[in-house]
Amino acid sequence: MNNAKVTLENMNVHFDSNHAVKSVSLDFMENTVTSIIGPSGCGKSTLLRSINRMHDLVPSAKVTGRILFDGMDLYDRSVDPVAIRRKIGMVFQKANPFPAMNIYDNVVAGYKLNNRMRRNESDEIVETSLKRVALWDEVKDRLKTSAMDLSGGQQQRLCIARTIAVQPEVILMDEPCSALDPIATLKIEELVEELKERFTIIIVTHNMQQAARVSDSTAFMYMGEMIENGPTKKIFTTPEHKQTEDYITGRFG
Amino acid sequence: MQQNELTATEESQFTNSCAKRRGADGDRIFRWLTFLFAAAVLLILGLMIFEMTKESLPSITKFGGRFISGSNWDAVQEDFASLPFLYGSIVSSILAILLATPLSVATALFITEVAPNRIGTVAASLIELLAAIPSVIYGLWGILVMAPWLQRTIQPWLADHFGFLPFFSGAPYGVSMMAGVLILAIMIIPIITAISREVLLAVPQSQREAAVALGATKWEMIRIAVLPYGRSGILGGVILGLGRAIGETMAVTMVIGNTPQISLSLLSPAYTMPSVIANEFAEATNALHSSALMEIGLILLVVTLIINVFARLLIWKVTKGHKGGVA
């Protein structure tokens, strides 16, 4: 069994009076894919965003409890959230490449923040990152053109390339395929499968088939609470809770 | 089977619904009315150019190209040329833009990205209030407070320490190119700030999140995500500010010294195109004098048009190949 890369201990998120995530405890194992499923508004995205401290941008958000990353408390006063986000990358629901940058500059945008680099080094980063997201062959002849000329699926893969170029240890994915067509979705799913060799992946998804296809473990959330979690196979075949069963069989949500 | 055929009632309903509705003429009237108003604007512009050209003809035929290249302005000898005014207008506006742009963008960034929401809103409305102050009041403050202060403090200091540079040579008069530039900068800061703020507010949160999630600090986020996204919009604000600066009359007239000369020194008085028109039109008794003023007005109009066309091209060039931005 792998080690837990990220551990939530009795974690709560409040937005003013709204209690969005309620006392969740959960382990995310190293080099595995964990999916978080649940109906809209169940707090799964909120939970995901607390792991790289994105809630720091929202003044009304308050995270309590502990989130451990390699045993270190992410919300400890001595922890620099900027440094954390370089270790824990994030891919968003809607592809958000930087429109003013070309493909090349998009890939190295994050990497350049941390490293002063030479030309050939950045060429190498661009090539390996794009190859790893299977985009290299499609764009290698037009690296200097705008990232906005790519299709939605290509843009999302570009955003993943941009994230892995920073060389994080964990990648958070917030419904990365919800704006994509089935073929683009399939490509991202294949990618997730490959990426787990190097990264720990936590993916929030609406799509239960997707969770079943890509993840090793699955956690089901409902109304801010973690109802059930375990190996994906078990959750989808023999769930312990009635609510989980109702959700995965499509009886609500 | 009769399935595909319409029954009599259905058919009559169908024709009824396709008949011309009462009030359908409204669309046509509306179209013509709006066209008329739009055409009127162009017509007025055309008439204005025509009339100004006609009125300037005596001056144009008398002085020809010398009117633009020469620098003499003598109402008694009836010898007129506009270069000092052109120089004064362009230099004062450009320097004012160079001074006002960084301040305005920084202010807008403070309001949108740094300050807590409440303080940002208050600051934004205060700055927009500045834009509502009549320019003569800026001018009054400029001539009673700023110019004397410049004459006592900044200008002597500059002349003492940097007098060897042509930009700071000569006696400190107070009223000067420097005073004109400062008053213009102060007057255009509100408009550039207000537009930059709108543009920055329109930058999608997803762009900020993209940068932050890559491990960007606040400043890095502004640098890689916020400013590039808004650059064409901010540029548009700067151009609007430039247009305002070049046409600004009252406040500049009060502080720039109104001396038709071309001097590199910021301490010397200067003159602008709108200022000379405002100052001399009432007393231009002979035909050539008023015709010369009219020609200056024409040049001002052309310069403004050129700036606007140039601005369009610039914005178009910046936005090219960048579809997400705010234009």
Image (spheres, grey):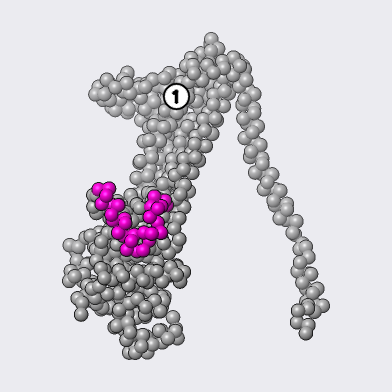
Instruction: Tell me if I can see residue B230 in this picture.
Output: yes
Residue located at (67% from left, 48% from top): B34
Quadrant location, the N terminus of chain A: bottom left
The number of numbered discs placed on residues in the rendered structure image is 1
- Taking the view exactly as shown, the residue that stands out farthest to the right is B8
Residue A134 counted in the magenta span: yes
User: Is residue A171 toward the left or the right of residue A73 in the image?
Assistant: right
Q: Position of residue B103 (x, y in %)?
A: 35, 41
User: Is residue B299 toward the left or the right of residue A106 in the image?
Assistant: right
Q: Position of residue A121 (x, y in %)?
A: 25, 51
Q: Which residue has dot 1 on it?
A: B87
Residue located at (59% from left, 19% from top): B60
User: Which quadrant of the figure has residue A124?
Assistant: bottom left
Secondary element under disc 1, as helix, strand or loop, is helix
User: Which quadrant of the figure has residue B262?
Assistant: top left
Vertical side of A69 occupied by B262: above or below: above
Magenta segment boundaries in residue numbering: A118-146
Residue located at (23% from left, 52% from top): A115
Q: Nearer the viewer, residue B166 or B100?
A: B166
Vertical side of A17 occupied by B73: above or below: above
Residue B171 counted in the magenta span: no
Residue located at (45% from left, 19% from top): B260
Q: Nearer the viewer, residue B183 or A241?
A: A241
User: Which quadrant of the figure has residue A196?
Assistant: bottom left
Instruction: Tell me if I can see residue B267 in this picture.
Output: no
Q: Label 1: chain?
A: B
Q: Position of residue A227 (x, y in %)?
A: 32, 83
Quadrant location, the C terminus of chain A: bottom left
Type of the residue with mark 1 = Tyr
For label 1, the crowd category at 10 Å Cα-Cα, with few meaning under 14, some 14 to 19 and many 20 or more, is many
Q: Position of residue B49 (x, y in %)?
A: 62, 30
Give the main secondary structure, helix, strand or loop, of the magenta stretch.
helix
